[in-house]
Amino acid sequence: MCGIVGGIAQRDVVPILMEGLKRLEYRGYDSAGVAVLDERQHLQRIRSVGKVAALKHLIDDADLASNLGIAHTRWATHGMPAERNAHPHMSGERVAIVHNGIIENYAELRQELSAKGFAFTSETDTEVIAHLLADVLESEPDFINAIREASRKLVGAYALAVVSPDDPDQMVVIRAGSPLVIGLGEGENF
């Protein structure tokens, strides 16, 4: 069980992401992390082991701010509590993803992606999704269509939030058999 939160707005969403993580911390206290697109449209990620308060110190020290980001609090299911297993997971500088759920076919997908040259740094099923999406983006440049195509290859129940510098004005969410709440506002969505 994990907690995911994301936001896109015309203001800094990092404080909102952190408040969301605090409220979701009961869903996972092994690690927490945030990924945002910075002013140069590059992905910036900060992760920590332990409770959300540890992540907050790192974010405060980094002076992180963005109008688009995703965040995660983790209860370890695949992989031990360690920074390398903390979300968000990335595939290069192309995709950042947070995930709640279990991908039942992650081992076979991991083998396929490893054979294609993708390097794995974690023990999680989430990193498999990030690399799978990056792989699909090589042949399907439309971000939404690539996410649809990648999700068809996933077996399990999950909710995802994804951001990419390839599509800096969108945060994409998808779910299959797992709940996901979306908040729509004026000029901002969470």
Image: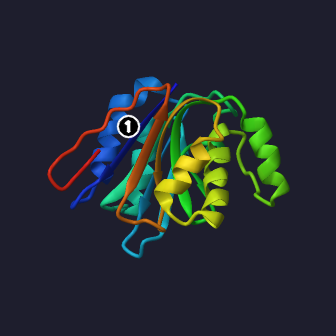
Q: Would residue 88 be seen by someone viewing this image from the given angle?
A: no
The residue shown at (51%, 55%) is: 145
Q: Residue 1 appears at what percent x and percent y?
A: 52, 24
Which residue occupies the extreme bottom position in the image? 40
Q: Residues within 10 Å of mark 1 (few under 14, many from 20)?
A: many
Instruction: Relative to 63, say whether 78 is above or below.
Output: above
The residue shown at (60%, 62%) is: 137
Total labels: the figure holds 1
Is 180 left or right of 165, judged from the image as shown? left
Pick the residue in front: 137 or 100.
137
Pick the residue in front: 78 or 110.
110
Element marked by disc 1: helix
Q: Residue 81 appears at what percent x and percent y?
A: 64, 34
Quadrant of res 12? bottom left
The residue shown at (28%, 49%) is: 15
Which residue occupies the extreme right position in the image? 115
Q: Give the residue at mark 1.
A: 21
Q: Residue 177 appears at what percent x and percent y?
A: 50, 25
Is 111 left or right of 172, judged from the image as shown? right
Pick the residue in front: 13 or 105.
105
